Amino acid sequence: MRDDARRNEALGREVFGALAVKGGEAVAQTDIAVQPGETGKALQWGTYVHRDHRGHRLGLLLKIDMMHWLAEAEPQLKIIQTWNNVDNAFMINVNEALGYRLSRIFNMYELRLDRPK
């Protein structure tokens, strides 16, 4: 996380993060980056909920909290972009409940380095 913070600072990104804590343990988090030069647009990087704490709408609540924060801190924002794996129905439902709409579909390519030769 420290490396990410240094990299973001060097690139001029402003990153907003929200964390849910229960009993002193982080159980969910979300973050959004506002890119320099990308007037009006931010990137939702990740929303994660610990396996033991899923099903309580923590992802939804964190994203709502983040949207309120950004409305005050970055009022020029008009678009927040995010992505999801096609099989992550839970987060797709959260995003759609918040008003996100599908803008495009892309393929992910991977190079397997552990293949037998």
Image (tube, rainbow, N blue to C red):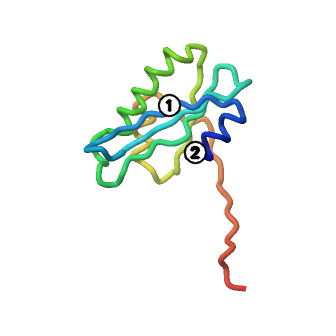
| Residue name at image x 61 percent, y 44 percent | 4
Q: How many marks?
A: 2
Q: Pinpoint residue 61: horizontal percent, then vertical percent.
A: 35, 32
| Residue name at image x 46 percent, y 38 percent | 30
In the figure, is residue 109 to the left or right of 84? right
In the figure, is residue 49 to the left or right of 30? left
Asked whether the beta carbons under mark 2 and mark 1 sit within 8 Å of each other, the answer is no
- Residue 65 falls in image quadrant: top left
The residue at which mark 1 appears reads as 100
Q: Earlier in the sequence, mark 2 or mark 1?
A: 2
Please name the amino acid that badge 1 sits on.
Answer: Tyr
Is 9 rendered above or below residue 41?
below
**27 or 58, which is in the foreground?**
27
Is 14 rendered above or below residue 76?
below
Q: CA distance from mark 2 to mark 1?
A: 30 Å
The residue carrying pointer 2 sits among few (fewer than 14), some (14 to 19) or many (20 or more) residues within 10 Å by Cα, namely few
The residue at which mark 2 appears reads as 2
Q: Pinpoint residue 86: horizontal percent, then vertical percent.
A: 51, 51
Q: Secondary structure at mark 2?
A: helix
In the figure, is residue 25 to the left or right of 67? left
Q: Secondary structure at mark 1?
A: loop
